[in-house]
Image: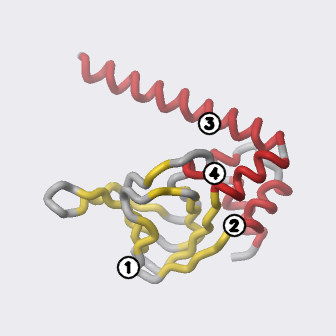
């Protein structure tokens, strides 16, 4: 996958909505790419997170740890998925384990890289803040609707 394809993939992610191709090119160029063999654990639940991962190819299985020592499948992540994007902005921990189901490739976007983009390009900070506010509003609306359904 080349730089042009990376930019197109990033453009499809809501957190980067509204950013120009030039900013996405800088982000893709500064990010680290990793190839994963099937069965490789990208990260474990509870681990400290200092970056987000964008799935470029392949498929990752997402699981949560259960008290009895078993894992519970909570989903999959394929090309165009972003994992733990909040870690690009603030300290966070992983809320699930991500394991490559197939040979995969991911793009690692570190908090340091993303903060540098925010500092050097104020318009990126404005667009990111707007997107986070919209996502938070949507999340709280969904939570309120779920709470209302449970009350009835």
| Crowd class of label 4 (few under 14; some 14 to 19; many from 20; radius 10 Å) | few
Dot placed on the residue nearer the N-terminal end, 3 or 4: 4
**Whole-percent x and y of residue 11?**
71, 54
Identify the mark nearer the N-term, 1 or 2. Answer: 2
**x, y percent for residue 127:** 75, 38
- The residue singled out by tag 1 in the image is 39
Residue at mark 3 to residue at mark 2: CA–CA distance: 21 Å
Task: Give the mark nearer the N terminus: 4 vs 2.
Answer: 4
The image shows residue 117, relative to residue 44, as above or below, that is above
Closest to the camera, between mark 3 and mark 4, is 3
Foreground residue among 90 and 151 = 90
Q: Secondary structure at mark 3?
A: helix
Specify which label sits upstream in the sequence, 3 or 2. Answer: 2
Q: Is residue 140 found left or right of 120 in the rendered image? A: left
CB contact under 8 Å: marks 3 and 2: no
The quadrant where residue 45 appears:
bottom left
Between disc 4 and disc 1, the foreground one is 1
- CB contact under 8 Å: marks 1 and 2: no
Q: Which mark is residue 13?
A: 4
Q: Which mark is residue 31?
A: 2
- Between the residue at mark 1 and the residue at mark 3, the CA separation in whole angstroms equals 33 Å
Label 2 Cα neighbours within 10 Å, binned few <14 / some 14-19 / many ≥20: some
- Give the Cα distance between marks 4 and 1: 26 Å
State the residue at coordinates (69%, 48%).
16
């Amino acid at each position: 996958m080349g730089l042009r394809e990376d930019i197109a993939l990033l453009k499809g992610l809501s957190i980067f909505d509204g950013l120009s191709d030039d900013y996405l090119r800088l982000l893709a160029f500064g990010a680290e790419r990793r190839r994963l063999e099937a069965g490789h654990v990208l990260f474990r639940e509870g681990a400290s997170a200092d970056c987000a991962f964008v799935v470029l190819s392949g498929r990752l299985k997402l699981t949560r740890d259960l008290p009895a020592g078993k894992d519970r499948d909570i989903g999959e992540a394929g090309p165009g998925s972003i994992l733990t994007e909040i870690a690009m902005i603030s300290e966070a921990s992983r809320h699930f384990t991500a394991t490559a189901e197939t040979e995969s490739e991911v793009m690692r976007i570190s908090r340091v890289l993303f903060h540098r983009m925010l500092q050097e390009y104020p318009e990126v900070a404005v667009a990111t803040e707007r997107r986070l506010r919209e996502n938070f509003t949507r999340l709280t609306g969904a939570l309120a609707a779920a709470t209302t359904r449970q009350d009835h």
